[in-house]
Protein backbone atom coordinates (compact mmCIF):
# COMPACT_ATOMS: atom_id res chain seq x y z
CA UNK A 1 0.00 0.00 0.00
CA UNK A 2 1.38 3.40 -0.96
CA UNK A 3 0.76 6.47 1.16
CA UNK A 4 2.25 9.92 0.81
CA UNK A 5 -0.12 12.31 2.53
CA UNK A 6 0.83 14.49 5.44
CA UNK A 7 0.30 13.12 8.94
CA UNK A 8 -0.46 15.85 11.42
CA UNK A 9 -0.92 13.56 14.41
CA UNK A 10 2.85 13.28 14.95
CA UNK A 11 2.80 16.40 17.10
CA UNK A 12 2.80 15.76 20.81
CA UNK A 13 0.12 17.52 22.82
CA UNK A 14 0.30 17.97 26.61
CA UNK A 15 -1.87 15.42 28.37
CA UNK A 16 -1.34 13.11 31.33
CA UNK A 17 2.34 13.07 32.41
CA UNK A 18 3.86 10.18 30.46
CA UNK A 19 5.85 8.93 33.43
CA UNK A 20 2.56 7.84 35.05
CA UNK A 21 1.37 5.91 31.96
CA UNK A 22 2.54 2.29 31.57
CA UNK A 23 4.40 1.82 28.26
CA UNK A 24 2.79 -0.21 25.48
CA UNK A 25 5.38 0.30 22.72
CA UNK A 26 9.13 0.85 22.55
CA UNK A 27 10.40 2.58 19.40
CA UNK A 28 14.15 2.45 18.93
CA UNK A 29 16.57 3.61 16.30
CA UNK A 30 19.30 1.14 15.33
CA UNK A 31 22.69 2.60 14.33
CA UNK A 32 24.24 4.54 17.19
CA UNK A 33 21.32 3.59 19.44
CA UNK A 34 20.35 -0.08 19.79
CA UNK A 35 23.36 -1.40 17.89
CA UNK A 36 26.88 -1.15 19.21
CA UNK A 37 29.46 0.47 16.97
CA UNK A 38 30.41 -2.95 15.57
CA UNK A 39 26.73 -3.30 14.46
CA UNK A 40 26.03 -6.09 16.95
CA UNK A 41 23.09 -6.44 19.33
CA UNK A 42 24.55 -7.24 22.74
CA UNK A 43 23.27 -10.21 24.78
CA UNK A 44 22.01 -7.77 27.40
CA UNK A 45 19.99 -5.89 24.78
CA UNK A 46 18.61 -9.10 23.28
CA UNK A 47 17.43 -10.14 26.76
CA UNK A 48 15.86 -6.72 27.43
CA UNK A 49 13.94 -6.73 24.13
CA UNK A 50 12.64 -10.24 24.80
CA UNK A 51 11.61 -9.28 28.34
CA UNK A 52 9.70 -6.26 27.04
CA UNK A 53 7.79 -8.38 24.52
CA UNK A 54 7.04 -10.96 27.22
CA UNK A 55 5.63 -8.15 29.37
CA UNK A 56 3.26 -7.20 26.52
CA UNK A 57 5.22 -4.18 25.28
CA UNK A 58 5.67 -4.13 21.51
CA UNK A 59 9.13 -3.26 20.18
CA UNK A 60 9.43 -1.40 16.88
CA UNK A 61 12.74 -0.82 15.15
CA UNK A 62 12.53 2.62 13.53
CA UNK A 63 15.50 3.28 11.28
CA UNK A 64 16.86 5.10 8.27
CA UNK A 65 18.14 1.77 6.95
CA UNK A 66 16.53 0.17 3.90
CA UNK A 67 14.72 -3.11 4.43
CA UNK A 68 17.52 -5.15 2.90
CA UNK A 69 19.89 -4.00 5.68
CA UNK A 70 17.65 -5.29 8.47
CA UNK A 71 19.29 -8.69 8.86
CA UNK A 72 21.13 -7.38 11.94
CA UNK A 73 17.85 -7.39 13.90
CA UNK A 74 15.58 -9.75 11.94
CA UNK A 75 15.94 -12.37 14.68
CA UNK A 76 14.59 -9.94 17.29
CA UNK A 77 11.32 -8.69 15.79
CA UNK A 78 9.24 -11.18 17.83
CA UNK A 79 5.53 -11.54 17.16
CA UNK A 80 4.49 -8.64 14.95
CA UNK A 81 7.57 -8.83 12.72
CA UNK A 82 7.31 -5.18 11.64
CA UNK A 83 9.95 -2.47 11.32
CA UNK A 84 9.80 1.12 10.10
CA UNK A 85 12.54 1.65 7.50
CA UNK A 86 13.83 4.50 5.34
CA UNK A 87 13.07 7.17 7.99
CA UNK A 88 9.37 6.35 7.83
CA UNK A 89 9.09 5.74 4.08
CA UNK A 90 8.20 2.05 4.57
CA UNK A 91 6.73 -0.34 7.10
CA UNK A 92 8.21 -3.76 6.45
CA UNK A 93 7.33 -7.26 7.62
CA UNK A 94 10.67 -8.95 8.31
CA UNK A 95 9.29 -12.41 9.05
CA UNK A 96 10.52 -13.80 5.74
CA UNK A 97 14.14 -13.08 6.64
CA UNK A 98 16.80 -11.28 4.56
CA UNK A 99 15.71 -10.80 0.96
CA UNK A 100 12.16 -12.05 1.61
CA UNK A 101 10.66 -9.07 3.41
CA UNK A 102 7.21 -7.72 2.53
CA UNK A 103 6.31 -4.03 2.28
CA UNK A 104 3.19 -3.41 4.36
CA UNK A 105 3.06 0.37 3.87
CA UNK A 106 4.98 2.62 1.46
CA UNK A 107 5.07 6.42 1.68
CA UNK A 108 6.95 7.32 -1.46
CA UNK A 109 8.72 10.42 -2.68
CA UNK A 110 6.94 11.48 -5.88
CA UNK A 111 9.23 11.67 -8.91
CA UNK A 112 8.37 15.36 -9.50
CA UNK A 113 9.24 16.24 -5.90
CA UNK A 114 12.43 14.23 -6.22
CA UNK A 115 13.48 16.04 -9.39
CA UNK A 116 12.66 19.42 -7.83
CA UNK A 117 14.76 18.53 -4.79
CA UNK A 118 17.72 17.49 -6.95
CA UNK A 119 17.57 20.70 -8.99
CA UNK A 120 17.09 23.08 -6.07
CA UNK A 121 19.79 21.53 -3.92
CA UNK A 122 22.25 21.43 -6.84
CA UNK A 123 21.68 25.16 -7.26
CA UNK A 124 22.00 25.89 -3.55
CA UNK A 125 25.01 23.63 -2.94
CA UNK A 126 27.08 23.07 -6.12
CA UNK A 127 29.00 19.83 -5.92
CA UNK A 128 26.14 17.83 -4.37
CA UNK A 129 25.91 14.26 -5.68
CA UNK A 130 22.99 11.86 -5.34
CA UNK A 131 21.84 8.29 -4.88
CA UNK A 132 18.28 7.01 -5.26
CA UNK A 133 16.80 4.50 -2.81
CA UNK A 134 13.77 2.54 -4.04
CA UNK A 135 11.83 -0.25 -2.39
CA UNK A 136 14.24 -2.81 -3.83
CA UNK A 137 16.73 -0.95 -6.01
CA UNK A 138 19.66 1.35 -5.26
CA UNK A 139 21.09 3.63 -7.97
CA UNK A 140 23.56 6.50 -7.91
CA UNK A 141 25.46 9.11 -9.81
CA UNK A 142 28.99 8.20 -10.96
CA UNK A 143 30.63 10.67 -8.53
CA UNK A 144 28.63 9.54 -5.50
CA UNK A 145 31.18 8.04 -3.05
CA UNK A 146 31.20 4.45 -1.84
CA UNK A 147 29.32 5.15 1.39
CA UNK A 148 27.16 2.03 1.45
CA UNK A 149 27.60 -1.70 1.62
CA UNK A 150 26.36 -2.52 -1.85
CA UNK A 151 27.01 -2.04 -5.56
CA UNK A 152 24.51 0.28 -7.29
CA UNK A 153 22.26 -1.15 -9.98
CA UNK A 154 22.70 1.82 -12.37
CA UNK A 155 25.19 4.71 -12.64
CA UNK A 156 23.57 7.83 -14.18
CA UNK A 157 22.80 11.40 -13.19
CA UNK A 158 19.90 11.81 -10.79
CA UNK A 159 17.97 13.72 -13.46
CA UNK A 160 18.34 10.80 -15.88
CA UNK A 161 17.48 8.24 -13.21
CA UNK A 162 14.33 10.05 -12.10
CA UNK A 163 13.15 11.36 -15.46
CA UNK A 164 9.98 10.05 -17.15
CA UNK A 165 12.06 8.22 -19.76
CA UNK A 166 14.66 7.05 -17.26
CA UNK A 167 15.79 3.48 -16.66
CA UNK A 168 14.36 3.03 -13.18
CA UNK A 169 11.55 0.48 -12.86
CA UNK A 170 8.12 1.66 -11.81
CA UNK A 171 8.64 1.02 -8.13
CA UNK A 172 8.40 3.68 -5.41
CA UNK A 173 11.26 6.02 -4.60
CA UNK A 174 11.67 5.94 -0.83
CA UNK A 175 14.32 8.61 -0.46
CA UNK A 176 17.15 10.48 -2.13
CA UNK A 177 20.60 10.54 -0.57
CA UNK A 178 22.46 13.81 -1.15
CA UNK A 179 26.18 14.02 -0.37
CA UNK A 180 28.46 17.04 -0.32
CA UNK A 181 32.23 16.56 -0.06
CA UNK A 182 33.12 19.75 1.84
CA UNK A 183 30.14 21.27 3.64
CA UNK A 184 29.60 20.97 7.39
CA UNK A 185 26.87 18.36 7.95
CA UNK A 186 24.59 20.56 10.05
CA UNK A 187 25.09 23.56 7.76
CA UNK A 188 24.22 21.37 4.76
CA UNK A 189 21.04 20.22 6.50
CA UNK A 190 19.95 23.77 7.26
CA UNK A 191 20.71 24.93 3.73
CA UNK A 192 18.76 22.03 2.21
CA UNK A 193 15.71 22.60 4.39
CA UNK A 194 15.62 26.25 3.35
CA UNK A 195 16.12 25.40 -0.33
CA UNK A 196 13.50 22.64 -0.53
CA UNK A 197 10.82 24.08 1.74
CA UNK A 198 7.73 21.88 1.83
CA UNK A 199 8.59 19.89 -1.31
CA UNK A 200 10.25 17.18 0.76
CA UNK A 201 11.32 16.23 4.27
CA UNK A 202 15.09 16.52 4.80
CA UNK A 203 17.10 15.02 7.65
CA UNK A 204 20.40 13.28 8.33
CA UNK A 205 21.77 10.37 10.33
CA UNK A 206 25.36 10.19 9.13
CA UNK A 207 28.37 11.97 10.68
CA UNK A 208 29.28 13.12 7.15
CA UNK A 209 27.45 15.67 5.00
CA UNK A 210 24.94 13.10 3.78
CA UNK A 211 21.29 14.12 3.73
CA UNK A 212 18.22 11.89 3.44
CA UNK A 213 15.31 13.37 1.47
CA UNK A 214 11.83 11.83 1.80
CA UNK A 215 8.31 12.75 0.77
CA UNK A 216 6.57 15.75 2.37
CA UNK A 217 5.52 14.92 5.91
CA UNK A 218 7.30 11.56 5.89
CA UNK A 219 9.38 10.97 9.02
CA UNK A 220 9.97 8.35 11.65
CA UNK A 221 7.48 10.17 13.85
CA UNK A 222 4.61 10.40 11.37
CA UNK A 223 4.83 6.74 10.32
CA UNK A 224 5.19 5.62 13.93
CA UNK A 225 2.08 7.67 14.73
CA UNK A 226 0.18 5.81 11.99
CA UNK A 227 1.30 2.42 13.30
CA UNK A 228 0.36 3.36 16.85
CA UNK A 229 -3.06 4.67 15.80
CA UNK A 230 -3.77 1.32 14.09
CA UNK A 231 -3.05 -0.38 17.43
CA UNK A 232 -4.95 2.04 19.64
CA UNK A 233 -1.70 3.21 21.26
CA UNK A 234 -1.35 6.85 22.26
CA UNK A 235 1.91 8.81 22.13
CA UNK A 236 1.90 8.80 25.95
CA UNK A 237 2.31 5.02 25.87
CA UNK A 238 5.39 5.15 23.62
CA UNK A 239 9.01 5.14 24.80
CA UNK A 240 11.49 6.17 22.08
CA UNK A 241 15.29 6.10 21.73
CA UNK A 242 17.59 7.86 19.26
CA UNK A 243 20.90 9.56 18.62
CA UNK A 244 20.79 11.65 15.41
CA UNK A 245 18.71 14.45 13.81
CA UNK A 246 16.48 11.96 11.96
CA UNK A 247 15.23 10.87 15.42
CA UNK A 248 14.26 14.34 16.67
CA UNK A 249 10.60 14.32 15.57
CA UNK A 250 10.06 10.82 16.98
CA UNK A 251 11.62 11.74 20.32
CA UNK A 252 9.52 14.91 20.50
CA UNK A 253 6.32 12.99 19.73
CA UNK A 254 6.78 10.07 22.12
CA UNK A 255 5.50 10.33 25.67
CA UNK A 256 8.91 9.36 27.01
CA UNK A 257 12.10 9.63 25.00
CA UNK A 258 15.79 9.08 25.60
CA UNK A 259 18.85 10.52 23.90
CA UNK A 260 21.83 8.21 23.89
CA UNK A 261 25.00 9.24 25.66
CA UNK A 262 26.59 9.61 22.22
CA UNK A 263 23.69 11.66 20.80
CA UNK A 264 23.77 14.79 18.62
CA UNK A 265 23.03 18.00 20.62
CA UNK A 266 19.69 18.48 18.82
CA UNK A 267 18.63 15.02 19.98
CA UNK A 268 19.59 15.77 23.58
CA UNK A 269 17.48 18.93 23.42
CA UNK A 270 14.47 17.07 21.96
CA UNK A 271 14.39 14.08 24.33
CA UNK A 272 12.76 14.03 27.74
CA UNK A 273 15.61 11.99 29.22
CA UNK A 274 19.11 10.62 28.61
CA UNK A 275 20.69 7.23 28.89
CA UNK A 276 24.23 5.94 28.47
CA UNK A 277 25.88 5.41 25.08
CA UNK A 278 25.04 2.68 22.59
CA UNK A 279 28.26 0.81 23.39
CA UNK A 280 27.12 0.71 27.03
CA UNK A 281 23.70 -0.78 26.17
CA UNK A 282 21.81 2.43 26.90
CA UNK A 283 18.51 1.12 25.49
CA UNK A 284 18.68 -2.01 27.63
CA UNK A 285 19.45 0.06 30.74
CA UNK A 286 16.20 2.01 30.33
CA UNK A 287 14.07 -1.02 29.37
CA UNK A 288 15.25 -2.90 32.46
CA UNK A 289 14.27 0.04 34.63
CA UNK A 290 10.87 0.42 32.95
CA UNK A 291 10.09 -3.26 33.45
CA UNK A 292 11.12 -3.09 37.10
CA UNK A 293 8.64 -0.22 37.59
CA UNK A 294 5.66 -2.08 36.10
CA UNK A 295 2.90 -2.91 38.61
Image (spheres, rainbow, N blue to C red):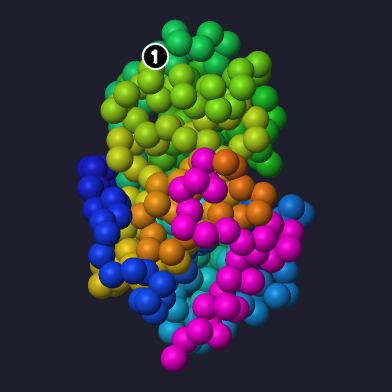
Position of residue 123 relative to residue 87, above or below, is above
- Left or right: residue 129 compared with residue 116: right
Residue at point 50% right, 46% down? 269
Position of residue 134 relative to residue 13, above or below, is above
* Residue 73 visible in the snapshot: yes
**Disc 1: CA contacts within 10 A as few (<14), some (14-19) or many (>=20):** some
Q: Nearer the viewer, residue 169 or 191?
A: 191
* Res 174 → quadrant: top left
Q: Is residue 148 on the magenta stretch?
A: no
Residue at the limit of the structure toward the bottom, as seen here: 295
* Res 19 → quadrant: bottom left
Position of residue 12 relative to residue 136, above or below, is below
Q: Which residues are magenta?
A: 266-295
Q: Nearer the viewer, residue 192 or 175?
A: 192
Residue at point 39% right, 60% down? 254
Residue 82 locus on image (x, y percent): 44, 66
Residue 73 locus on image (x, y percent): 61, 64
**Dominant SS in magenta:** helix
Position of residue 54 relative to residue 63, above or below, is below
- Residue labelled with disc 1: 120
Residue 169 locus on image (x, y percent): 41, 34
Residue at point 40% right, 52% down? 252
Residue at point 59% right, 27% down? 185
Q: Nearer the viewer, residue 102 or 257?
A: 257
* Res 210 → quadrant: top right
Amino acid sequence: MRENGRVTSATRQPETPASTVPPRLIATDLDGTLLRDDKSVSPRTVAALAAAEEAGIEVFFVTGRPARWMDVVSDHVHGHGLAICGNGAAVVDLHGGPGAHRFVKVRELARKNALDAVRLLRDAAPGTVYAIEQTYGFNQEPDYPKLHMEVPDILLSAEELLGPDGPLPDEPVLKILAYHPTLDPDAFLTLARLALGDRANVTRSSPSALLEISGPGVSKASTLALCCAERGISHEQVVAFGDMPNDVEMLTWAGRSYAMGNAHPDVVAAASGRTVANNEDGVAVVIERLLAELP
